[in-house]
């Protein structure tokens, strides 16, 4: 871990990430990189360049990708490669159980609970107030939205986004690249990528459930 942190993305998600980094009190200086040239400050921190400028600082700063879109976040983090020092950010008010693994570039926000023996991959977002129970496996670049509840022994495939307030029953597996709509209840395994909405969650076909 280095004395300086650069956060790629200075919009809403980036500001929450920066606030967590400040509260962690690990880095002596924190700044943003963002492709919006008009943006000079965010959350009282300077925007010192664009995303591509990360490579200028790769040797002397930790770099965190704070981009909400799963595919975009994956693309940037992979481009940074093994040469970048990519931290894990955990809000001081998050509760992390025993034998929990968090991959590089993952953030756990305020009020999050992650219970024991859960493994979370690289570049994941565990958003405000989400709960993840025991023995879960979240693959890389998953977004668990605000207020989501995952029961025990749930598996979430790479790149899946679980919408705000959704619930997933125990022993459920959700495949890669799914979108689970807000407030949905997943009570059966999902084996086909797509958009799933409703209670119980069903796949949306041609714009309709």
Image (cartoon, rainbow, N blue to C red):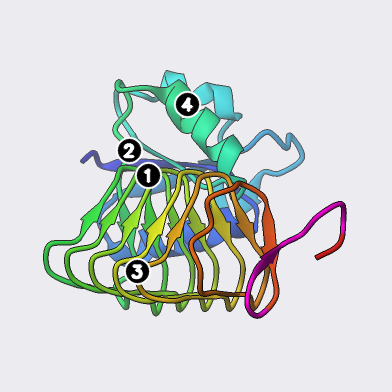
C-beta proximity under 8 Å, tags 3 and 4: no
Q: In this view, does 72 lie above or below 132?
A: above
Residue 108 placement (x, y as % from top left): 38, 63
N-terminal of the pair, mark 3 or mark 4, is 4
Cα distance in 3D space between marks 1 and 2: 6 Å
Cα distance in 3D space between marks 3 and 4: 40 Å
User: What's the magenta region?
Assistant: 199-207
Cα distance in 3D space between marks 2 and 4: 12 Å
Query: Residue beneath label 1, please?
Result: 105
Q: Is residue 178 above or below residue 95?
A: above
Depth check, front residue: 168 or 149: 168
Placement of the C terminus among the 4 image quadrants: bottom right
Task: Please report the residue visible at 51 percent of the width from the left and 45 percent of the height from the top.
Answer: 176
Q: In this view, does 98 lie above or below 86?
A: below
- Left or right, residue 96 beside residue 112: left
**Quarter location, residue 138:** bottom left
Placement of the N terminus among the 4 image quadrants: top left
Cα distance in 3D space between marks 2 and 3: 31 Å
N-terminal of the pair, mark 2 or mark 3, is 2
Checking the image for residue 26, the label placed there is: none
Query: Residue beneath label 2, please?
Result: 86
N-terminal of the pair, mark 1 or mark 2, is 2
Label 3: which secondary element? loop
Checking the image for residue 54, the label placed there is: 4
């Amino acid at each position: 871990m280095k004395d300086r942190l650069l956060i790629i993305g200075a919009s809403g998600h980036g500001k929450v990430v920066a606030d967590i980094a400040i509260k962690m009190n690990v880095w002596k200086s924190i700044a943003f990189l963002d492709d919006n040239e008009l943006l000079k400050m965010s959350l009282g921190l300077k925007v010192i360049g664009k995303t591509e400028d990360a490579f200028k600082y790769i040797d002397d700063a930790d770099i965190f990708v704070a981009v909400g879109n799963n595919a975009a976040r994956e693309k940037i983090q992979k481009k940074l490669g093994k040469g970048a020092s990519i931290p894990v950010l955990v809000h001081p008010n998050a509760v992390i159980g025993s034998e929990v693994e968090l991959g590089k570039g993952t953030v756990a926000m305020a009020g999050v609970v992650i219970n024991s023996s859960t493994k979370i991959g690289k570049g994941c977002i565990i958003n405000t107030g989400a709960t993840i129970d025991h023995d879960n496996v979240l693959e890389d670049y998953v977004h668990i939205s605000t207020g989501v509840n995952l029961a025990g022994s749930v598996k979430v495939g790479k790149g899946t986004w679980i919408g705000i307030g959704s619930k997933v029953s125990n022993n459920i597996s959700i495949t890669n690249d799914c979108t689970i709509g807000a407030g949905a209840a997943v009570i059966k395994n999902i084996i086909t990528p797509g958009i799933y909405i409703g209670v119980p969650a069903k796949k949306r076909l041609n714009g309709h459930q």
